[in-house]
Image (cartoon, rainbow, N blue to C red):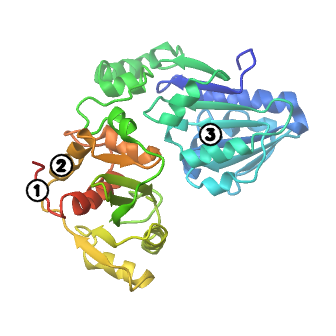
Amino acid sequence: MPDGDWDVWLILAGRGTGKTRAGAEAVLEHLETQGANARVGVGAPTAADVRDVCAEGVSGLITVARDQFVSYNRSLGEAHHHRGGYVKFLGAEEPARWNGPQWSLLWADELALWNQDSWEQAQFGLRLGDHPRCIATTTPKSRAFVRTLSEQPTTHVTRATTMQNPHLSELVRARLYDRYGGTRLGRQELEAEWLDDVPGALWQRSQIDATRVKVAPDLARVVVAIDPAVTSGEDSDETGIVVCARGVDGRGYVLADRSCRLTPDGWARRASTAYAQFSGDRVIAEVNNGGDLVERVIRTVDRQLPYKAVRASRGKLTRAEPIAALYEQGKMSHVGAFPELEDQLCQYTPDGYEGSPDRLDALVWGFTELMLGGAEVAFI
């Protein structure tokens, strides 16, 4: 760990640089020096990630120092060090899991992929000892809260590129740079560069920031738009749930992003709750994949919800462009910040998006209804 008076050691590094091993070694050093006073929280984007990477991965704590731990319970995600310290492994997909535990040290792996609420909850628990600290290891990605963290005076930033790791196979290094060197993905994943705006993306962060507001004005209409996932497993796509509104001023407003990875009953209840909270006028759901099943799920939760099914007859890009144009014209505002949604918007290009942009899809459906009269037409 670096010298100096820091609160967060932020390791911004490319793939294969050894950042996970650095985090593990720092945790081991803390456990050894603090003894029974050490209480360490180790987190990753999901519970599977923290188990498979931070605990049992090639560079994980248990793998590199199994003989230092008197016990490791993989089902509970707990380990006890021979010097008396305790380690808890938690995923960042459920913020409530971080509400309560206290830490003398926190290791947040791949922080740029965390649910931001989990990161905030974890900070409240970082309060044991004379100087509780955090280690964050991540590849830079377009997440505003990570960028802000890197700029804090109490954050010590360490940077590294894939090329700089002498222990990485020359064959692997050559293969990665031959394939991705000089590309935007390579600059991010190998050279660990911040790439805030994606060239050619339909949305730009500067546009969203310029019209962001803290409070919505009087509203003429509110809809809860849903882009349902086909399945609900751990690796399934998310169900996009975005609360959209048109103000009496004629502008569009994003009120909430309630997207989730839940069972049909779970996301339907989440949408119903949002409808009630924001005094919605209608629930809108895309039914290309789920058909009549989507309405049956919603009706099971609340038979009285005003509901409209929408079906895509044009490609995703064609549907998204008119709404992106409204942003470009300054006619749309986000009421507060919605990092995961905004990441999807600002990373979506005419060439597509890596993964399924479910939050984006829900937003597009909502504002197509509110701002374009529900018609899938090109914006004039």
Label 1 neighbour load within 10 Å: few <14, some 14-19, many 20+: some
In this view, the mark in front (1 or 3): 1
Q: What amino acid type should be assigned to the residue bearing mark 1?
A: Val
Q: At 48% across and 35% down in the image, what residue appears? A: 144
Q: Which of these two is toward me, 29 or 314?
A: 314
Disc 3, SS: helix
User: Can I make out residue 227 in this image?
Assistant: no
Label drawn at residue 71: none
**Residue 296 x, y percent position in the rendering:** 34, 82
Q: Please give left or right for residue 156 compared with residue 336 in the image.
A: right
Image position of 165 with respect to 194: above or below = above
Of mark 2 and mark 3, the one earlier in the sequence is 3
Image quarter hosting the N terminus: top right
Q: What amino acid type should be assigned to the residue bearing mark 3?
A: Cys
**Residue 3 x, y percent position in the rendering:** 74, 14
Of mark 1 and mark 3, the one earlier in the sequence is 3
Q: Which residue is mark 3?
A: 54
In this view, the mark in front (2 or 3): 2
Q: Which residue is mark 2?
A: 322
Q: At 27% across and 55% down in the image, what residue appears? A: 250
Distance in Å between CA atoms under marks 2 and 3:
43 Å
Q: What amino acid type should be assigned to the residue bearing mark 2?
A: Pro
Label 2 neighbour load within 10 Å: few <14, some 14-19, many 20+: many
Q: Please give left or right for residue 60 compared with residue 252 in the image.
A: right
Distance in Å between CA atoms under marks 1 and 3:
48 Å
**Residue 292 x, y percent position in the rendering:** 26, 79
Q: Which residue is mark 1?
A: 377
Q: At 20% across and 39% down in the image, what residue appears? A: 351
